[in-house]
Image (tube, rainbow, N blue to C red):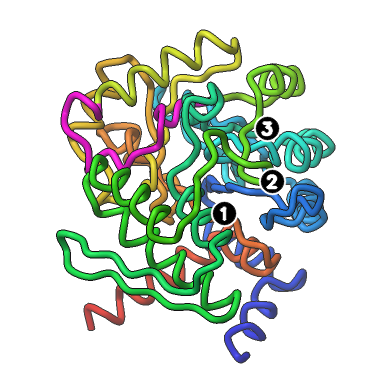
Amino acid sequence: MMRRILLQAVTSPPILPVVEALAGAPATIFMLHRFADPEAGNPGHAPDRLAAHLAWLRERHYHLTPLAEVFRRLTAGEPLPPRTVAFTVDDGYADFVRVGAPVFAEYDCPVTVFIITGFLDRRCWNWWDRVTWALATASRSELTLETEDGRWRYQWQTGAERGQAIDQIVERMKRIPERRKLELIARIAAALEVELPDQAPGRMAPMTWDQARTCARHGVTYGPHTVTHPILSQTDPQASSEEIEESWWRLQQETDAAIPIFCYPNGDPGSFGAREIATVQRLGLVGAVSSVPDYVSDRARSDSSVYSIPRFTYPEDRSDLVQIVSGFERGKNAVRRALGRG
């Protein structure tokens, strides 16, 4: 409670200009995924809060900047203006079209969607959604599975407990080689006596390519995000290369709004490495984004870190958003590091 009160005080109108001046309001990239869509039955970012945040950023004269322009300046060695903010959305779910895109358009805010091309091609649906579907639709309340890593055993009685089991299984599967992961999903469904649909069900469905092109007419751009969204570090060299290459090739086939910026699935440092960066460079893409929470650094202009540009998870609370875009978050981190050294 005290932390929240302090944060609200620091980001209040009388004090905020001082914070922005001291911290420099460094360039920020936000990462979003799903949008709340009661009609489809899925949770996500609330459109009214997103609208309020974009209105506030406009009122405070933040530069809502296309992601391609951020990377153009980085590669050209041009400084990014203070108060630069860019928005990205991962995966390509249909709720972006129904809920997210209209809000961004209303505030004339550029946004880049990173597309899982096999998802939009209806060749696959996302592996974490298959895990979710299996547990959410199962009549059983227990899962027991013998794996190479030992016995997996999960039990649930309430919806919250079921959700916790889903989260734990998904996190565990992120560090399993891709082929084993897909086999395990099939075994989970069999153990729960659930039949997985061939196509993603309603709330888990992707946008269509036609919808992507329609959104592009209102300023939305698109970047490649692999074909099937594997954790690339958990694939063999050929599969890693093909996932990146084919997604970029396929995206260019479907839309003129494709930009040469890649997005690593999961995006944490353990999910990609020098191998993936080399593939992105070889394809001529100008950069890539991760999910490491940090500001866009000037050093990205002169080294390979332009291929692992950080992004903050988009916050629902306005005080948290203000803390990030003002640069106050950087000051907090600097203090933590200084105290750690002490």
Q: Position of residue 145 (x, y in %)?
A: 28, 65
Mark with earlier residue (1, 2): 1
Give the camera-side residue of 14 and 257.
Answer: 257
Give the quadrant of residue 82.
top right
For residue 25, which numbered disc appears in the image?
Answer: 1
The secondary element bearing badge 1 is classed as loop
The secondary element bearing badge 2 is classed as loop
Give the CA distance from mark 2 to mark 3. 13 Å
Q: Residues within 10 Å of mark 1 (few under 14, many from 20)?
A: many
Query: Count of labels shown?
Result: 3
Q: Is residue 123 magenta?
A: no
**Is 105 positioned to the left or the right of 213 in the image?**
right
Q: Residue at x 56, y 48 (%)?
A: 30
The secondary element bearing badge 3 is classed as loop
Give the CA distance from mark 1 to mark 3. 19 Å
Q: Residues within 10 Å of mark 2 (few under 14, many from 20)?
A: some
Q: Is residue 237 magenta?
A: yes
Mark with earlier residue (2, 3): 2
- Nearer the viewer's eye, disc 1 or disc 3? 3
Q: Residue at x 54, y 62 (%)?
A: 138
- In the rendered image, which residue does mark 2 sit on? 62
Contact between labelled residues 3 and 1, with CB atoms less than 8 Å apart: no
- In the rendered image, which residue does mark 3 sit on? 110
Contact between labelled residues 2 and 1, with CB atoms less than 8 Å apart: yes
Location of residue 237 with respect to 194 vertically, above or below: above
Give the camera-side residue of 255 and 161.
Answer: 161
Q: Residues within 10 Å of mark 3 (few under 14, many from 20)?
A: many
Report the span colored magenta. Answer: 223-240
**Mark 3 is on which residue type?**
Pro
Mark with earlier residue (1, 3): 1
Location of residue 288 with respect to 48 vertically, above or below: above
Q: Residue at x 28, y 32 (%)?
A: 302
